[in-house]
Amino acid sequence: MNPIAEFAARIGTTGEVWIRGAGTRVESPGDVRTVEAPAGIRSFEPDEMTVTCGAGTRLSDLDDVLAERGQYVNLGQLRHPHGTVGGAVATGWNDHLRLGRGPVRDSVLEVHVVTGRGDVVKGGGPTVKNVSGFDLCRLMVGSHGRLGAIAEVTLRTRPLPKATRWLSVDDVDGSRIADLVAHLYRPSAVLWNGFVGWVCLEGHPSDIEAARTEMRDHGFSNEESMSGPDLDALPYRWSIAPRAVVAHVEERPGRVTAEVGVGVVHSDEVPPRRNTDAAIEAIHRRLTDSFDPERRLNPGAGDGLIR
Amino acid sequence: MTDAVLEALRSAIGSDGVRHNDAELRLFAHDASNLVGEAGVVCYPRSVDDVRRVIDVCRHFGIAFVARGAGTGLAGGATPIGGAVVICTTKMNRILDVDVSSRLAWVEPGVLNLDLTRHVGRFGLHFAPDPSSQQSCSIGGNVANNSGGPHCLSEGVTSAHVLACDVVLSDGSLVRLGGEEPESEGFDLRGAFVGSEGMFGVVTAICVRLTPDPLDVRTMLLDFETVRAGTDTVSAIIAAGMVPAALEMMDRLCLQAVEAYIHAGLPTDAAAALLVEVAGAPSAVAADAEAIERIGRQHGARTVRIARDEDERMLLWKGRKNAFGAIARIKPNYYLHDTVVPRRHLSDVLDHVYRIAAEEDLMVLNVFHAGDGNLHPLLVFDKREPGVLDRVHRAGAAIVEVSVAHGGVLSGEHGIGLEKRDFMPLMFSEQDLRAQAWIREAFDPLGLANPFKVLPSPSGCGDAHAHVEGLWV
Ligand SMILES: Cc1cc2nc3c(=O)[nH]c(=O)nc-3n(C[C@H](O)[C@H](O)[C@H](O)COP(=O)(O)OP(=O)(O)OC[C@H]3O[C@@H](n4cnc5c(N)ncnc54)[C@H](O)[C@@H]3O)c2cc1C
Ligand SMILES: Cc1cc2nc3c(=O)[nH]c(=O)nc-3n(C[C@H](O)[C@H](O)[C@H](O)COP(=O)(O)OP(=O)(O)OC[C@H]3O[C@@H](n4cnc5c(N)ncnc54)[C@H](O)[C@@H]3O)c2cc1C
């Protein structure tokens, strides 16, 4: 039996199941049957810039294989390198290089999932460009596996940047942060806590040096730093409009670190519950009613809207 | 269309927004494809409230509606079937808000793609998706078709540039999918909506990401004695770790047609030419341009012409972007195809395309997005010639089949619409298609938004075919 069919057979058609990735973040509820997705890279085509792998593949294994050919895949693994591809896709969490590298959701080209009814369903296609049919791939990213257990994915790869440099810039207050951003050409990240800015630049080393000079010329002296700021002390994650970031940080100087231009704010405060709209809830309900009518898959995983 | 419906629409949005004359109905019976349906009435809403009122009337009478932007779609997506109500967004064309520092804009769906780019140009920004039809297509249509363009190779297609959509659903509710904030709760409904070809609801406002203009650009034209040398160059560039801003190919017939039209000094004796653009920061651009020239020469490029200035760059692009105008001079009608294959199969599939065209005694020109394997075989013909349409349709079907057989997909950017609806089983199983139908039903349980498109109708359900002239699948 092929690994996808075997995964589907293990999921079956009745009873609750928890799809376990590496369990790096979300632990299964104790009393639910646990199933792991198939692991392993099925094909990697460097000149197509695509890779197909089982959802149980470790991100670190995938990174190693791609790096041998100078490529990577953007699955938000910067801070959580030890999870699985399926866990990264199911949670859809981005890391703080999203400004330059884009969101995880843009990395997925094709998915094979097992629905709560036990059927194997494919969405998307194996090529880097495709608009055949409705976009099941986007729907699966961040679904917490509540619409389908992810068996296999085809992902878009990218060339590894020639160089990556983190810079820290002192004395950046609310009046200067917009000016700093305006003098950067497509940075990979700009983080800011109200006093210090951290900038990640990727690309050709001479371009990075030129950008540093340009920053200095505009009064932003900068130091090279090993990595970005330590975000581990800020366990909560807010999602706000990028245009609201400056005011948000100025109200909480030093207590938050914001991803400028993106709108993710790493915080010591629990984010407020967001309002939900009845029509949006109804779409969610109808989707889950179709894909997993008995709510068997990953019971309890997800946020307020996914249940 | 009954008088009662017309009356209800007129009182809903005013009689000047409701058109029912023969000329307009004929014009709106099709998009830019040759698939002709039947429009019941054409409505021109001016606001989201107008859209809601029109949809309320449709729901009340149980009539289908079809959103339409500029009607440049090539898959029959905006072709109304069986007298549907056409909701045309051309009067909803305001740019609502531009936030330069956050690099985003809110627009109404009828804003033309190039108008947005022109509007934000003064801030050093642009809207990255650049379909060849960008002068005339609407952003609402781009969203519905998840459109692409030459510069989507490095920047990604429309989906990567849409942050939020305000959508009126067929039950009359107005929802915001996605948002300016980066991580909305719940499923990615924004992502599901982009590319839904008008079948999930009518988008009334769109929040798009704007992209900074590059610091430096290098545009070059490489020409080859064989098509294969050109496509091998494409693969080698990508394998060397570069993603150029654009990587387009034209074959000999196309080069000749374009040269006769614009006199840009194109190499008309070459089998194929590649138009390559690299953009970004200066050192990266210089390094990539050098590497591309070297790779091209290794693969037998006869000449490498590098645009010396912006004028020459525009001239080279003019050749690419006006290919369709040039072709109109050869024969009065064309049929533009759109499939994607893995890059390494480009050359084999092109061989098949030439063979298929020869077998059907048709002329074919190729001008396409080689960088992402997105083929656009263009069949030119004169439809007054008896039997020619049958040959065109047979050739089209064969091109689609050969692409899928080489690990490709049905459409890279034009969408499925009516044109490729009945090809969907080539790529998807019954279960895959059922899952796609579930997504549609979640947004539009009433089935009023642009029915009969994309998903092959289960047997016995409706006789949509009967109403569509030119349907060939
Ligand atoms: C900066 C950052 C912070 C994060 N913080 C959190 C956090 O606070 N909370 C959080 O929930 N996540 C968080 N994540 C997401 C998650 O930890 C990572 O994405 C990680 O890759 C998960 O992988 P895993 O294999 O360990 O998954 P697991 O921890 O085993 O599973 C994560 C979730 O995904 C589901 N899942 C796993 N594999 C599949 C599959 N094949 N099909 C369907 N569903 C599957 C699981 O059921 C579970 O609900 C964070 C990610 C990043 C990048
Ligand atoms: C010469 C030529 C060149 C082209 N080049 C390209 C190219 O390079 N790349 C590419 O991707 N496409 C290309 N196209 C195809 C076409 O221009 C695109 O698909 C475009 O995005 C369609 O926009 P439109 O406003 O004309 O949409 P329409 O044709 O009016 O509609 C297209 C689809 O969108 C739906 N729709 C329109 N507005 C809305 C709305 N407000 N809400 C919900 N649904 C809506 C319609 O129902 C229909 O299904 C080309 C077409 C031509 C004629």
Image (cartoon, grey):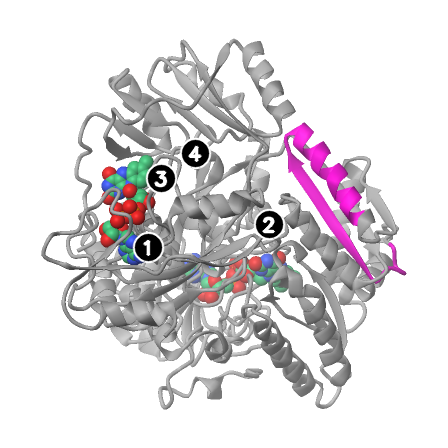
Residue A249, given in percent of the width and then of the height, sits at 30, 21
Bounds of the magenta span? B267-296
Camera-near label (2 vs 4) is: 4
Residue beneath disc 4: A97
Label 1, label 2: how far apart the Cα atoms are: 24 Å
> Element at badge 2?
helix
The dot on residue B180 is 3
Q: Amino acid at mark 1?
A: Leu
Residue type pointed to by label 3: Glu
Disc 1: which chain? B
Per the image, the residue denoted by label 2 is: B153
Q: Position of residue B240 (x, y in %)?
A: 66, 45
The Cα atoms of the two marked residues, 2 and 3, are separated by 24 Å
Q: Closer to the observer: label 1 or label 2?
A: 2
Q: Is disc 2's CB within 8 Å of ligand 2?
A: no
Please tell me if label 1 and label 2 are on a single chain.
yes
Say which mark, if any, is on residue B189. 1
Q: Amino acid at mark 4?
A: Leu
- Asked whether the residues under the numbered discs 1 and 2 touch, taking CB atoms below 8 Å apart as contact, a structural biologist would say no
